[in-house]
Amino acid sequence: MKKIFFSRSHGLFLFSVVSFAFIMNGCFSVKLIADYDEAVDKQVTEIYRNISIYMQDLVNTPQVSGTDSIARTTKYNSIQLDISTIKLRASAKEKNSQQIQQVELLADSWNKIGELQKLRPTKDMVQSAQSGLEITLTAILRLEIAKKRS
Amino acid sequence: MALDIQQLLTPMLNAAKAVIGDKWPGIQNYAETEFKKIGKNILDIEKNILQGNYSEDQARLLLDIQKNATKAVLLALEGMTLIMTERAINAALGAIRDIVNNAIGFALL
């Protein structure tokens, strides 16, 4: 009698463990956040570089006119497009809400840079904005790299 | 009245720590480093507002960028916490893999 009781209990334990494993993942490991994406890592690193160059140019030459102004607008729009591309890629992945929100914040900050430029920013202002953008970009990269190590 | 960095840093860290919970030690260094940068940026903006160097519109845009940076750091912390939890669960499943597989006679886990 005691033996039968043990077997049922043992079976129940195994059933619970197996059910838990299947319910949690449908496979054999639990996934709470999207996998590392090398393309996002590279694209964000490239945007980081382009934004640094852009902001440095803004520090060195706050006001431009004529063809320089057109060239600056082209660069600004190009970075905006790159951010949209990352957002699209991030949105295509499941369990990636943190990264999607981070990229949306980056896009919003980049829009703010566009607005700030119309208000004739000083060197201090550009440096403050650059620091904020770099913290945002680092946060995106930091999370992506953490996924790589998991 | 001028602010100091500790007035900003302590509530930011306490708020993040309360949300992150017991995973805090694993991400504390990153959080402190980034919140210090944001705190310093906010102090610079505040100083320039008080000195009349920034217009209200300029200051608002700059503060919005710092606000976005803070949210992005918090999202990174949230994601890193999920990764740590994921590791813990998978380690627990890994620890019982052999027991379960041996008991049932085939490699299920």
Image (cartoon, coloured by chain):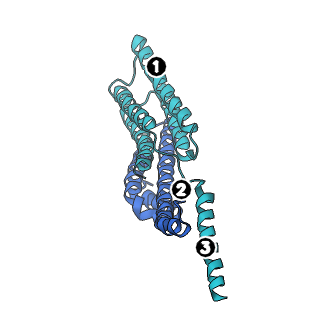
**Mark 3 or mark 2: whose residue is earlier in sequence:** 3
Tell me if I can see residue B51 in this picture. no
Q: Residues within 10 Å of mark 2 (few under 14, many from 20)?
A: some
**Mark 1 or mark 3: whose residue is earlier in sequence:** 3
Q: Residue furthest left?
A: A60
User: What residue is rendered at 42% in x and 19% in y?
Assistant: A72
Read off the residue under disc 1: A73
Q: Quote the CA–CA distance across marks 1 and 3.
A: 65 Å
Where residue A29 appears, x then y in whole percent? 52, 56
| Colour in which chain A is drawn | cyan
Q: Nearer the viewer, residue A50 or B70?
A: A50
Between tags 1 and 3, which lies in front? 3
A95, above or below B83, in the image = above
Please tell me in which quadrant of the rendered image residue A6 appears: bottom right
Between tags 1 and 2, which lies in front? 2
Q: Residues within 10 Å of mark 3 (few under 14, many from 20)?
A: few
> Which structural element holds mark 1?
helix
Q: Chain of mark 3?
A: A
Read off the residue under disc 2: A28
User: What residue is rendered at 46% in x and 59% in y?
Assistant: B87
Where residue B64 appears, x then y in whole percent? 52, 41
Read off the residue under disc 3: A13
Check if mark 1's residue and mark 3's residue have beta carbons within 8 Å.
no
> Which structural element holds mark 3?
helix
Q: Chain of mark 1?
A: A
**Mark 1 or mark 2: whose residue is earlier in sequence:** 2
Please tell me in which quadrant of the rendered image residue A10 appears: bottom right
A10, above or below A27, in the image = below
In screen coordinates, is A67 left or right of A29? left
B16, above or below A139, in the image = below
In screen coordinates, is B29 left or right of A2? left
Kind of residue at badge 2: Phe
